[in-house]
């Protein structure tokens, strides 16, 4: 009897209204908390305007020189020359203003994503309960198509650059959280126990032991955050963010191969610069760092600081035959 009833049932009658629930939730939030999203829109929009003003106001050659000097400091003359040539190509295809608009969006979204993701990664590494809650949310954020984020973002923040920033933050946060968590969990437990044996507080262990040792992994996460933010430039252009994404969308609508290729090349150049730049910072072996280290060793030694004492104590504790306090 039960089998016959199931076979004769129309499956279309049993519909789980997930979409209706999501729409109702967004409507509720929009109606009762609209002032909060207006405030967020003002903050994000203001931050974007400031960064865009800094990048767009000076002549293009000033920004190219600044970027070239930064490239020289973090990676050397070859990277500096490549940066200057790449930015010169962007100027040559008349995409400079759009590139600076997109770079401003990427920088604002990346900084906000990093400010959110690194503390969440630390919390996840230090609390198993927090990790159990955060990881499914990250899975949802990474697997949900990026276009879906734009629908509630448009309803909450209206058309413009802010919905693009919000969608970019949501899309790019996950690797920052995961790699921060991984980096802190990968720190040698013996080193942490040595710090505890010398009476260091949990906060001091985090600041002076775990974060410095986990920094290469954390910087890899920051690199991925920036790369994912740049990958959202085109999608942000669909909601009125402008920049290179706006030109890519326009070229798609008009089937303009030339415009699409030029805007795409500009995106690639920015991606290569940001990737190499953040990777060099993450390695900690920059020409500027080596120069400062050489000057430090060549001068008079500085007075010992608490950080140096903590490091020395931990290294001593790890050596065979060295007694540690009970």
Image (tube, rainbow, N blue to C red):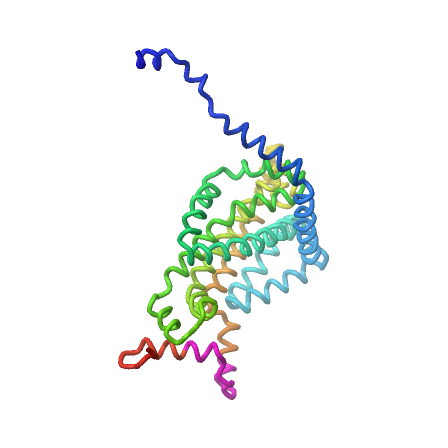
The percent coordinates of residue 177 (x first, y second) are: 47, 53
The percent coordinates of residue 205 (x first, y second) are: 44, 69
Image position of 36 with respect to 205: above or below: above
Whether residue 262 is visible: no
Q: Which quadrant is the C terminus positioned in? A: bottom left
Using the image as rendered, state which of residue 148 and residue 243 is in the foreground: 148
Image position of 115 with respect to 298: above or below: above
Q: Main secondary structure of the magenta part?
A: helix
How many numbered circles does the render carry?
0
Examine the structure image and report whether residue 325 is included in the region drawn in magenta: no
Whether residue 156 is visible: yes
Using the image as rendered, state which of residue 26 and residue 247 is in the foreground: 26
Using the image as rendered, state which of residue 61 and residue 220 is in the foreground: 220
Give the residue drawn at x 52%, y 39%.
146
Instruction: Tell me where residue 237 sits by quadrant.
Output: top right
Examine the structure image and report whether residue 301 is included in the region drawn in magenta: yes
Image position of 313 with respect to 23: above or below: below
The magenta region covers 294-311
The percent coordinates of residue 103 (x first, y second) are: 61, 52
Q: Which quadrant is the N terminus positioned in? A: top left
The percent coordinates of residue 48 (x first, y second) are: 66, 52
Q: Give left or right: position of 212 versus 63.
A: left
């Amino acid at each position: 009897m039960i089998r016959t009833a199931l076979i004769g049932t129309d499956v279309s009658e049993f519909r789980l209204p997930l979409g209706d629930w999501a729409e109702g939730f967004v409507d509720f939030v929009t109606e009762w908390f609209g002032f909060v999203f207006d405030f967020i829109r003002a903050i994000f929009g203001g931050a974007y305007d400031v960064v865009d003003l800094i990048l767009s106001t000076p002549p293009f050659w000033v920004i190219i020189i600044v970027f070239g000097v930064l490239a020289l400091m973090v990676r050397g003359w070859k990277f500096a020359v490549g940066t200057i040539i790449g930015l010169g190509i962007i100027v040559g295809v008349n995409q400079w203003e759009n590139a600076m608009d997109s770079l401003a969006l990427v920088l604002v979204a990346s900084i906000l994503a990093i400010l959110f993701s690194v503390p969440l990664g630390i919390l996840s590494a230090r609390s198993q309960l927090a990790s159990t809650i955060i990881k499914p949310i990250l899975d949802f954020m990474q697997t949900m198509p990026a276009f879906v984020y734009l629908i509630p973002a448009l309803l909450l923040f209206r058309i413009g650059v802010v919905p693009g920033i919000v969608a970019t933050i949501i899309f790019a946060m996950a690797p920052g959280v995961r790699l921060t968590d991984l980096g802190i969990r990968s720190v040698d437990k013996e080193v942490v126990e040595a710090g505890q044996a010398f009476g260091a507080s949990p906060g001091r262990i985090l600041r002076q032991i775990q974060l410095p040792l986990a920094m290469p992994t954390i910087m890899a996460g920051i690199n991925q955050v920036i790369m994912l933010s740049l990958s959202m430039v085109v999608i942000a252009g669909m909601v009125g963010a402008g920049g290179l994404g706006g030109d890519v969308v326009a070229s798609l609508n008009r089937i303009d191969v030339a415009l699409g290729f030029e805007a795409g090349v500009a995106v690639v150049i920015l991606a290569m610069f940001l990737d190499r730049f953040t990777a060099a910072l993450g390695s900690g072996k920059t020409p500027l760092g080596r120069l400062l280290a050489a000057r430090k060793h060549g001068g008079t030694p500085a007075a010992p600081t608490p950080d140096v004492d903590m490091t020395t104590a931990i290294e001593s504790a790890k050596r065979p035959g060295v007694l540690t306090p009970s």
